[in-house]
Amino acid sequence: MQGVIWHLYARQEKGMIRGDDGSQLPFRKCALNGVEFRTLSPGQRVCYRIQEGWLGKEAVEVRPLPAEQAKA
């Protein structure tokens, strides 16, 4: 799945992704794959997988898309 980071909670090291399908999913720092939390920014395009978590669906294996894919 693909989407955009639309909000980051820096102190809690978590954020929200708005998927291309309109879904809104939370993610935690531990869900990142190959990227540091502090390097993320709102509006950044990412790809991810959806997993059922303790409080419902959440994004996992979150990683930024390369610039050429983000423009597509």
Image (cartoon, rainbow, N blue to C red):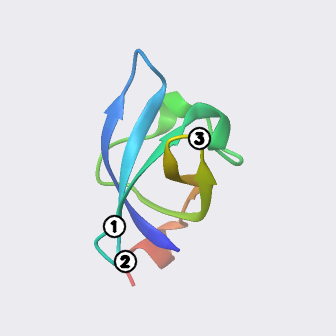
Which residue shows up at 52% across the image and 52% down it?
Answer: 58
The answer for how far apart the CA atoms under marks 2 and 3 are is 34 Å
Mark 3 or mark 1, which is nearer the start of the sequence?
A: 1
Closer to the eye: label 2 or 3:
3
Instruction: Determine whether 7 is above or below 12 in the image.
Output: below
Instruction: Determine whether 60 is above or below 65 in the image.
Output: above
Is residue 21 in view from this perspective?
A: yes
**Residue 71 shows which numbered tag?**
2
> Of helix, strand and loop, which one carries label 3?
loop
Residue type, mark 2 in image: Lys
Instruction: Give the side of residue 28 with respect to residue 8, left or right.
Output: right
- Taking depth in this image into account, of 55 and 31 the one nearest to the observer is 55
Which residue shows up at 59% across the image and 41% down it?
Answer: 54
Instruction: Determine whether 40 is above or below 2 in the image.
Output: above
Residue type, mark 1 in image: Ser
Instruction: Give the side of residue 4 with respect to residue 66, left or right.
Output: left
Q: Which residue is mark 1?
A: 23
**Residue 45 shows which numbered tag?**
none
The answer for how far apart the CA atoms under marks 1 and 2 are is 20 Å
Structural crowding at the residue carrying mark 2, measured as other residues with C-alpha within 10 Å and reported as few (<14), some (14–19) or many (≥20): few
**Residue 54 shows which numbered tag?**
3
> Of helix, strand and loop, which one carries label 1?
loop
Structural crowding at the residue carrying mark 1, measured as other residues with C-alpha within 10 Å and reported as few (<14), some (14–19) or many (≥20): few
